[in-house]
Amino acid sequence: MRFKSAAPAGLPQVNLVPMLDVLMTVLTFFIIIAMTLTGQQMINVKLPTTTHDRQPQAAPVPTQIEPLVVGLDADGQVIMDNQVISNRVLAERMGTYLAANPQGLVVLRADRDLTYAQVATVLKTMQAIGGDRVSLAFERS
């Protein structure tokens, strides 16, 4: 009696689908954890200072024009030449300066204890007058 001998079946097959399902689940878990950790709010961050040493890439100014500096004190009052001024006077002085200096720049130096809303309100007023020639000053630490 002869038994049928099994013919060689060739290479065994490995099913990779279950292993890929587990790897994709682990990857999804780490992506979700990473997204929640990067979205945390930081408390007591003082944004007006920077320790960055690289100079910003700005268009070169052919001649050095002294910028018009506008201050904003801790009480939210606009200051120019060490005097408190109104928004009307600010608009007049900025208009005169920008007309006389087409390449001039207006810089707002705001107190670091002011809220973002207070600074943004003054910046909006200044931007309505000076457009893209208005900037906010930061102090390097």
Image (spheres, rainbow, N blue to C red):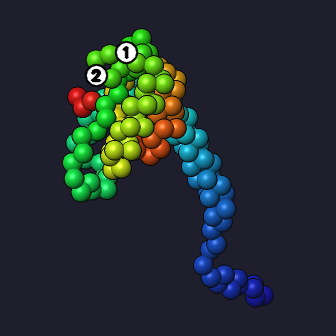
For this orientation, the residue located farthest to the top is 75
At label 1, which amino acid type do we have?
Answer: Val
Query: Quadrant where the N terminus lies?
Result: bottom right
- Residue 31 location, x and y as percent? 56, 45
Residue 112 higher or lower than 14, as above or below: above
**For residue 4, side relative to residue 106 (left or right):** right
Q: Residue 70: image x %, image y %?
A: 35, 28
The picture places residue 118, in percent across and down from the top left corner, at 49, 21
Quadrant of residue 65 in the image?
top left
User: Real-space Cα distance between discs 2 and 1?
Assistant: 8 Å
Q: Quadrant of residue 90?
A: top left
Tell me where residue 68 appears, x and y as whole percent: 31, 35
Question: Pointer 2: residues within 10 angstroms few (<14), some, or many (20+)?
Answer: few
Q: Residues within 10 Å of mark 1 (few under 14, many from 20)?
A: some
Q: Residue at x 35, y 20 (%)?
A: 79
Quarter of the image where the C terminus is located:
top left
Q: Which residue is mark 1?
A: 84
**Element under disc 2:** loop
Tag of residue 81? 2
Q: Is residue 133 above or below residue 57?
A: above
Element at label 1: strand
